[in-house]
Amino acid sequence: MIGLLLKDFYILKQYLKTMLLMAAFFVLISTGLDNPAEFISGFIVLICVMMTITSFSYDALANWERYALSMPVTRKEIVGSKYLLSLILCLAGAAVSFPVSLAVLKMTGPVEGFGMSEYLYSSVALISIAYLYIAVLLPLIFKFGVEKCRLIMIAVFAAPTAALIALSKAGVSMPSEASLKAFIQLLPALVILLNLVSYFISVRIFSAREI
Amino acid sequence: MDYAIEINNLSKRFERFHLNNVNLALPKGSIMGFIGENGAGKTTTIKLMLNLLKADLGSIRILGLDHVRDEKKIKEATGVVFDESSFHENMKPKQISKVLGRIYKEWDEPLFYEYLERFRLPANEDIKGFSRGMKMKLSIAAALSHHPKLLILDEATSGLDPIIRNEILDIFREFIQDEDHSILFSSHITGDLEKTADYVAFIHEGRILFSRSKDELIDDYGLLLCGSEDFKSIDKKDIIGYRGNRFGYEILIRNKDQMKQKYKGLTIDSVTIEDIMLFYVKGEESI
């Protein structure tokens, strides 16, 4: 398992450099925005989800899976390593976005109605949502392969937005701030649980797949 | 006799292809050439052995162990080389050694570096810049550096120039010096097999047509040469396959010595594995 993770870090190293460069650029842009902190957490989390997906693309390109399985590596370990990778990436993303956002906030001055508490809530929500995407996407990738998943991925990203628009059009009002905050407090645990379920589904899917 | 690979009644049905009742036995300490045209079922058989595909029927034992129950144990002791390098283009051999060192219990980093040096492969450059031959040599170095007992090679020498192919064949010959070591070597380049294999298994349209010692094979089969008049007088059941043109016929026959008695006036040439393969697959076609 550690070998597989090590492999993922090696192959993502170059990509990470590109992404960091892009991130630096976005941080610069963000200083001109109304709420830079939220923006920074948002794209760093997005980068982390993308990197998980990219590791699958690189594996597919190299025809890695059949080779990995010709070694003393079980299918469970391959699945587990990807879930672990995404968790590490999401946490690392959070660890990076936190100090960077704070630094930018300090530079640009406080945002009206967006104090430390709001910032923390929005960060937790964003990271949880990113990790929720992982829970939905990984079984799909293990089922259909990453190439076929590209379209599904867009749908998965677009669905919540579409749902929100539909709800607001239907006249459903936004929940109160208090209930939203209560929900966000529960969110991390909920998403971790969902990932656990997702992991077992992926193991089943991948164990049955012929390679 | 101890077998490195024992396959019994192995079957697997796909939409367009049927691997049908495959039996194969590779005695320990020997090299088996696994031949057949593209699409005959070589890779499918190998994938079944590695449990990448699930068999419909049949049993597979590798190094005396069940290929599903003892999968991990088997794979610790097996080195596999596929037709294409499976390493990521943006990795370096040095990194591969680190990764495989975490995967194989018996990974031998100094040995891996020895192979890199011998194959003149740079340890610290991206694989991206490697030629096909270099990538193949890297795959072979990786397959050998955890002290395997069995090597499974799927078209590992295809698409390489003769010099590199010979270099690789030399490595295989060295490997087989240890009588505990065995090689299954799938290829459609029959010349390579002629040089190295002890046994030849021939698969055609998902069935094993024969699986036997190479020397026996070469002794048994012959090419009978005759004109069109003589051709008519030849017993149909003696003909495995033939090629004819207006100058004469070439007929693949078995029991060469017996046939020499039976058809006294006619010439019987010795065959190569390639002849056998061609006549089985393409025989009975007039050219």
Image (cartoon, grey):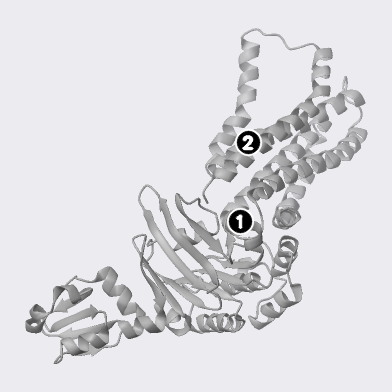
Q: Amino acid at mark 2?
A: Ile
Whether residue B144 is situated above or below residue A125 in the rendered picture: below
Specify the label residue A14 is tagged with: none
Q: Residues within 10 Å of mark 1 (few under 14, many from 20)?
A: many
Q: Residues within 10 Å of mark 2 (few under 14, many from 20)?
A: some
- Looking at the image, which is closer to me, B33 or A2? B33
Q: Secondary structure at mark 2?
A: helix
Specify whether residue A34 is in view. no
Q: Secondary structure at mark 1?
A: helix
Reading the image, the residue beneath label 1 is A69
Left/right placement of residue B240 relative to residue B115 reads left
Whether residue A114 is situated above or below residue B194 in the rendered picture: above
Residue B128 placement (x, y as % from top left): 62, 66
Instruction: Kindly identify the residue that appears in the image at 49 percent across and 74 percent down.
Output: B157
* Marked residue nearer the N-terminal end (1 or 2): 1
Reading the image, the residue beneath label 2 is A201
Residue found at the far left of this picture: B229
- Is the Cβ of the residue at disc 1 closer than 8 Å to that at disc 2? no
